[in-house]
Every structure is written in C-alpha cells, then in structure tokens.
Amino acid sequence: VCGPSDNAAGGPQTALPYAYVKISDGCDRFCSYCTIPFIRGRYRSFPLERVRAEVAAHAVAGVREVVLIAQDTGRWGEDFEEPSTLAELVSTLAEEFPDVWLRVMYLQPEGVTDDYLEAVAAHGNVCPYFDIPLQHVDEGVLRAMNRTGSRAEFEELIERILSRVPDATLRTTLIAGFPGETEELFEELVDFVEEGLFDYVGVFPYSREEGTRAARLDGQVDEDEKAERAQRLRDAADAASAPRVAERVGREMDVLVEGAEEDGQLYGRAMCQAPEVDGVTYLAAGEPGEVVRVRIADTLLYEMEGE
C-alpha cells in the first residue's frame, strides 16, 4: 500500500528478463496509516547518474524491462539543487536504452503531470502503464488518511490520462475498513470501482499499525468486517476489470517472454501487465528475454492467451 518492499530492488538480475530499480528512498507524505517516513526518513531522490548506471548494468545483463520504483516516484528530482522531474528521467532513460521497456510504479495522483504524460506518449519503450494508489474516494476518509483528492478529482485525472495516452493501462490500490469508513462510505468505494475505470485494482484491508495516527482514530472497524469489505471490493474489482481485459482479444501486442511452466507452457507479459501482480500472457513460441509479437486470442480474467 505504501510502496515497494526491500526485495524489490538490487543489482542485475539475470534469472529474469525484468528488474527493479529504486529511484529514491524515504517519504514526506506522512499518510496517517503508514510508518515508512519514520523508518525510511525524508524523501531523497537518487542522482540520475546512479539510476542510469543501474539501468545500464541491467541492460548489459540481458534485462529487457526495468521497473522504476520508489515510495513516491512522481517526486523524483524535486529535491535536487537543480530540480529535475520524473518526465525528464524517463525521457533520458528511454532515449539511452531504446531496447529496454521502462515501467513506472507507485505514482501518486499529483505526480501525473502533463509533462509526464507527454513523455509516456512520446516514447514507444515506456509502458503506457499508470500505477496510481488512490486508497479511497471519500474526501473525509482521505483527509483522515492525510491524503488529498476526491472521487470527482480522480475521475477527472483518469480522463486526462486517457486523453493524452489513449492506450493507457490503469492500476490502483484501495484500502477497505479504514477508521471512520461507514457502510455508506464503503458502498461509495464499491460504486467507484464498478465504474470500470481500472484494469487492475489491488485491495487491502486496513492494517492498524502501532504508533501511527490512524491507529488512534475513533471509528475503528471490526477485523471481520474489514476482511469482508475487502473481499467484496475485490469481487467488484474482478467483475469490473474482466470486460476491460476481454476487450484486448483480437489486438496485437508485444510480449516479453519470461519462461515456461512445469508442463512446458511458455508465458510472458505484455506492456499492460506489470511483473508479479497483473497476470501473464501464454505463448506458443519464443525464448526467455525475447520480445515477440502476438495476437490476443482469449482472456481469462487477468490472464491472456497469445497466438
């Protein structure tokens, strides 16, 4: 919910054709449910030279997709003596490593700037993929989380993304059962998900972390109720996402081959599928690390079949 874990970073990974590269550490948001600012400290962007060197090392090792991660990727560069932007970072990397797919994760709503949208639209090797954690849509709940935004603002944001990047894939994460979330407010969250605006929705029941402001809030939701709401929200998300994924049938897509299952079935991922979270695409032919062009013949919820 808060950002990447420690195991989502490191040096060159030759076993898989993708790798994670951290572009910053720490966080200044102080969401009321999160301990990361206290554990990681204030937000610190990593220099361009450091990020470029790590991407270069992965490219030499045969990695074909680099996933840029941070607690808050959209703020990259703003703390430099000469400020830079995520759009500039992505454009620089895309031009220097044209054979490497670039994917950005953990992009907060405020980080989706016009410049960033232009950078995504301008570079064919930048995945038109937007992982934007919203957490909730009710303004009162969001303020209790120490977050900004509203349902109307989020709907407008999605509209703006699609106007600039029509083939965008959209992912979000939501928290069910946050303190003060009534059944009525939860139903508003379900209604938002049922609009079918997102290809993928990650759902988490609120976790009461000791030492956070949220842990001291009134209106704590019962554990069983939190679990039930989270499952209801997942079910709604699956039902809303399935038609969006099914619309891919008949389209041609590039797929990065990752490997084979025990029965020999090849699989990989298209640009619309982030590693480890969005399902895979099954293939008839290809070698690990190779990008092959396929036609999507069928889908099963989040999985796709290429031919």
Image (cartoon, grey):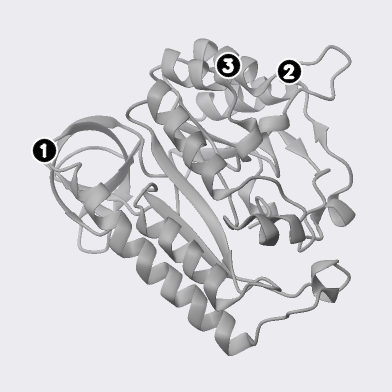
Q: What element carries label 1?
A: loop
Residue 250, which numbered label?
1
Asked if 61 appears above or below 13 in the picture, the reply is: above
Asked if 283 appears above or below 34 in the picture, the reply is: above
Left or right: where 84 falls relative to 42: left
Q: What's under tag 2, amino acid-wise?
A: Glu
Q: What's under tag 3, amino acid-wise?
A: Asp
From the image, tell me which residue sits under label 3: 115
Left or right: where 218 falls relative to 174: right
Real-space Cα distance between discs 3 and 1?
Answer: 32 Å
The mark nearer the N terminus, 3 or 1, is 3
From the image, tell me which residue sits under label 2: 49
Asked if 126 appears above or below 107 in the picture, the reply is: above
Can you give x and y, in whole percent of width and height, for residue 111 in the image?
64, 31
The residue at 32%/48% (across/down) is 259
Can you give x and y, in whole percent of width and height, for residue 9 in the image?
65, 44
Can you give x and y, in whole percent of width and height, for residue 69 in the image?
63, 39
The residue at 53%/39% (across/down) is 19
The mark nearer the N terminus, 2 or 3, is 2
